[in-house]
Image (spheres, rainbow, N blue to C red):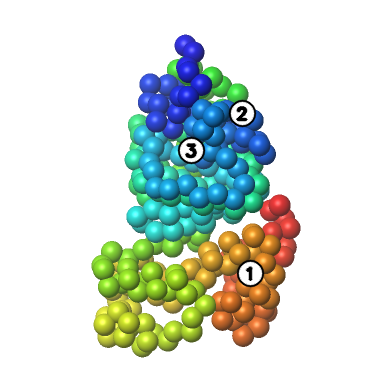
């Protein structure tokens, strides 16, 4: 079966349960981008770009080996640095911002194939076995039904995705209007020095109610949420080439060393080593 070059595999449900795609520096292999649009005249271009809200019939697993991806969904905002895999379930509306030259891979799954994967978007760690399985799957036809051996490979890949550790790169958004407005204000000024009583006043709540309700709606404390918001903001600025000292100052840290300690707490290494390793 031969498809027209404009076929968008991310919305094509008649093909194999799994379609794996490698991403090259300049997107030379047709579907080599997050949106998996094979139309070479309408390519999901690499570099630093924004893509407005959209959704796909297939679920997407994607990993970048260079650059940075920022994804927003109704469940919150999350960052995808190099060598982490992002998961977006089928039909999940999202917008995408990319920073820097990109390379990596993506896997497109039918709803049935991804039924046991998380119901909400997330970021997971990537191991060597997962990478090897994707490389193998990327050599398959994008239009032919999977055979017995290919289904076995897919089963192992899905097991790896299910068992992969989730990374603290997701910023869940609260559900209630007052807390969403408070969260939006914090995101607009991630370096603002706000005490818990000040935030409670902004939300027209008591400190106790704010703490309890924010934890209930997001699964983390408002203090943790603010720190993760700062981390995601810092990742974008560092990936754009800003100095650690400049980013630390913009986020209100007294010294760069305090910011580096926070960064190391999340990633196990300093910003300089982290970005050098993940180039």
The residue under label 1 is 264
Which mark is on residue 29? 2
Q: Secondary structure at mark 1?
A: helix
| Front of the two marks 1 and 2 | 2
Mark 2 or 3 closer to N-term? 2
Residue at 36% in and 88% down: 197
Give the farthest residue toward the front.
Answer: 41
Residue 260 percent across, percent down from the top left: 65, 74
Do labels 1 and 3 touch, CB within 8 Å? no
On screen, residue 199 versus residue 175, left or right, reads right
Query: Considering only order in the chain, which callout, 2 or 1, is on the residue closer to the N terminus?
Result: 2
Residue, disc 3: 35
The crowd level at tag 2 (other Cα within 10 Å; few <14, some 14-19, many 20+) is some
User: In what element is the residue under mark 2?
Assistant: loop
Q: Nearer the viewer, residue 7 or 115?
A: 7
Q: Is residue 93 left or right of residue 253?
A: left
User: x, y (%) of residue 46?
Assistant: 60, 42
Q: Is residue 98 left or right of residue 101?
A: left
């Amino acid at each position: 079966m031969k498809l027209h070059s404009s076929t968008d595999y991310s919305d094509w449900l008649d093909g194999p349960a799994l379609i794996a795609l490698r991403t090259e520096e300049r997107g030379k292999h047709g579907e080599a981008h997050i949106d998996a649009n094979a139309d070479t005249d309408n390519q999901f271009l690499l570099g630093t770009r924004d893509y407005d809200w959209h959704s796909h019939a297939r679920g997407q697993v994607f990993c970048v080996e260079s650059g940075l991806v920022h994804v927003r969904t109704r469940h919150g905002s999350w960052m995808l640095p190099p060598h982490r895999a992002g998961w977006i379930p089928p039909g999940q509306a999202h917008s995408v911002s990319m920073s820097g030259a990109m390379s990596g891979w993506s896997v497109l799954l039918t709803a049935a194939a991804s039924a046991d994967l998380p119901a909400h978007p997330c970021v997971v760690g990537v191991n060597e076995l997962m990478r090897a399985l994707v490389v193998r799957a990327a050599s398959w036809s994008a239009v032919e039904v999977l055979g017995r051996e290919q289904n076995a490979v897919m089963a192992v890949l899905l097991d790896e995705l299910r068992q992969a550790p989730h990374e603290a790169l997701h910023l869940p958004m609260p559900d209630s209007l007052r807390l969403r407005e408070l969260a939006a204000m914090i995101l607009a000024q991630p370096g603002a020095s706000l005490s818990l009583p000040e935030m409670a006043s902004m939300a027209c709540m008591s400190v106790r109610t704010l703490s309890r309700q924010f934890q209930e709606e997001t699964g983390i404390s408002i203090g943790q949420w603010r720190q993760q918001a700062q981390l995601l903001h810092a990742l974008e600025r560092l990936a754009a080439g800003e100095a650690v000292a400049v980013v630390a100052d913009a986020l209100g840290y007294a010294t760069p060393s305090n910011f580096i300690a926070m960064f190391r707490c999340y990633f196990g290494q300093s910003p300089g080593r982290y970005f050098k390793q993940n180039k």
